[in-house]
Amino acid sequence: MNWILLTIFMSLVIYYSEQKWIRNDKSEAIKADSDEVVIPKIITDNNRIQGSNNIKILLSNEQSTLFNILENTNRSMFITGKAGTGKSVLLKFFKEHSRKNIVSVAPTGVAALNIGGQTIHSLFKIYPGVIDLRSLKLGSEKELIKHIDTLLIDEISMVRADLIDAIDLKLKKAKKNKLPFGGVQVVMFGDLFQLPPILSDNAIKKYFEETYGGYFFFNANVWEKTSLEVYELSRIFRQKDDKFIAILNAIRTGYIGSELIEELNKRAFQNIPKTNLITLAATNNSVNRINATKLSELKDKVYEYKADIEGAIKPNEFIAEQTIRLKVGSQIMLLKNDQEKRWVNGTIGVISSLKPNEIKVKLNNVEHKIPKATWTKIKYTYDSDSNRVSEEAVGSLTQYPIRLAWAITIHKSQGQTFDSCLVDLSSGIFAHGQTYVALSRCRTLKGLYLKSPLKDSEIKVASEVVKFMKFTKTLPVNIDNTLV
C-alpha cells in the first residue's frame, strides 16, 4: 500500500513540475523584452502589458474579456467590429501573450507581415486559384500544423469559402481528427463590411454561387458542422465625433439618409490643403499618376535608396519599396511606429534633407533623422524537443520606412489612420466596402475632403454580408471579465 501511495505522490510532483515548466517557458520568452514576466490568467481592465517593442499596451474592457475567452477556452469565433475598434491590437496581444501554440495567417503578404505571420497559402501549401478539395494532400506542412492549438486569421473579409474548407480538411488530416478544423481553435478577425475576396471574373463568381452559395468565408461547408460564434467590438478608438461616426456607420451598412449624406458632401466644397494631405484613390494607375506628377514638379535632385534584401523576397511582398525615389520637398508616409513615439505608422511628413546615406523628414515643423527599419518574412516551424511552434526568419528587407504619399490606394490604406485625407473616387469604385474603408481612415470629419460629392452608386455593400450579419447572432462582450 505504501509503495502505491508513494507512486501516486511522485506522479503528482512530476505533473505539477511539468505544468510549472510549461508556464515558465512562455514567461521566459517574454522576459527578454519586459520586466513583467507574469501573464495573468484573467486580465483585468487597466492592466498594461509590455509588448515586444517595449510599448505598453492597454486593453479595453472588451478586449480584456475576449482575451480571457480566447486563452481559457477552445472555442472558435469570428471577432469583428467597425473600423478602428482595435481588432488588430487584440490579435497581436493574444498572439504575444498566450501560452498556446499559435500560428497567425492572412490572405495577403502585406497583411501577414503586419501581424508577424505567414500567408494562408504558404503555411498550408495551397496553390492560388480555385481549390479542388479532392486533390488536396498533406506535404511538408503536416509536422507543423498537427501541433497547432490556435489558428488566427486576419482580414477574414478577404478570405474565400474554398480556402476555409481547405484549411479544415488539411487540419483534419494532419491531426487525424474528424472534428471541424481537426479540433483546432480557429479565431478570425476582420470586418465583412470592408474589402471582400478578389474574384478574377464572373465565371468564378458563378462557380462559387452554385457550389457554396457565395464566396465569403461564412459560405464554407465546414460551418454546417460547427457553430460560428461572433463577437463584435463596439468601442471606436479612431474617431471621437458622434456625427462622423454616425455617417461612417451608415456608409458601412449602406443605409444612409439624405441628412447624413448632405452633411458628408459638404466636405466636397472645402478649400483643400496644399500640404500634409494624402489622397486615397481606388486604382494603382491613379495613385502612380498623382505621385509621379507631384515628384516631377519638384526641382531638386532625385535620390534613390535601394533596400538590403536577404533570402527569397518577392516584389510587393513588403509595404516598403525595394527602391525609393525621393526629392527634397516630397510628401511621404512613415511605415513603422517609432519606439520613442515621435511618429506612428501612417504619419505624413515632408522630406527636408537628403544625402546618400541619410534622410531627414519634417513632422509638425520638427526635423527628424529617420533610421532604417527591417521587415522580416517568417515561416512557422515545430520543435519536437520543446513541443512548441516557433517562428523562423526566411527573408528580410531593410529600408527607410518611407514611401511617397501624395496618394496611396484605398486597398493599401486599410488599417491606417490619417489626420487629413482627400478621397478621390473619380476612377470608379470596383469593390464592396471600398468607400467605407477610404472614409473611415480619417480621424475627423473636419480632416476629410472629397474630390467630388459622393454618389449613391459609390456606396457599395454586399447584400450577402448584410444578410449574414442581420441573421447571425452576435454575442455580447461581457465586460465584467467573466467568460461568456
Image (spheres, helix red, strand yellow):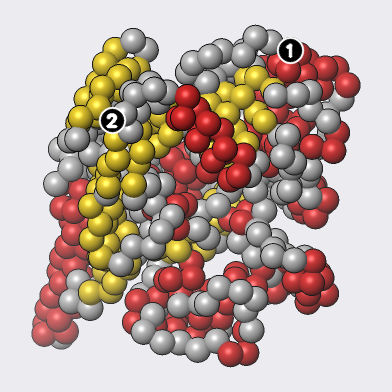
Q: Is residue 185 visible?
A: no
Please give the name of the residue rendered at 50% of the width and 58% of the height, measured from the top-left corner.
108
Please give the name of the residue rendered at 83% of the width and 30% of the height, measured from the top-left corner.
455
Q: Quadrant of the N terminus?
A: bottom left
In the image, residue 109 sits, relative to residue 423, either above or below, namely: below
Residue 420: x and y, percent?
54, 20
Residue 240: x and y, percent?
58, 18
Which amino acid type corresponds to the residue marked 1 in the rendered image? Phe
Which SS class for mark 1? loop
- Going by the picture, which residue comes out furthest to the right? 258
Which amino acid type corresponds to the residue marked 2 in the rendered image? Asp
- Residue at label 1? 269
Q: Quadrant of residue 304?
A: top left
Mark in front: 1 vs 2 = 1
Q: Quadrant of residue 200?
A: bottom right
In the image, residue 210 sits, relative to residue 481, either above or below, namely: below
Dot 1 or dot 2: first in sequence order is 1
Find out whether the residues at labels 1 and 2 contact each other: C-beta distance under 8 Å.
no
Q: Quadrant of residue 26?
A: bottom left
Closer to the camera, 274 or 441? 274
- Residue at label 2? 338
Circle 2 packing at 10 Å, graded few (<14), some (14-19), many (20+), is some
Q: Is residue 43 visible?
A: yes
Closer to the camera, 24 or 113? 113
Left or right: 384 with respect to 245? left
Which SS class for mark 2? loop
Please give the name of the residue rendered at 56% of the width and 81% of the height, measured from the top-left corner.
169
Residue 412: x and y, percent?
53, 43
Left or right: 404 with respect to 430? left
Please give the name of the residue rendered at 50% of the width and 35% of the height, measured from the top-left corner.
292
In the image, residue 447 sits, relative to residue 172, either above or below, namely: above
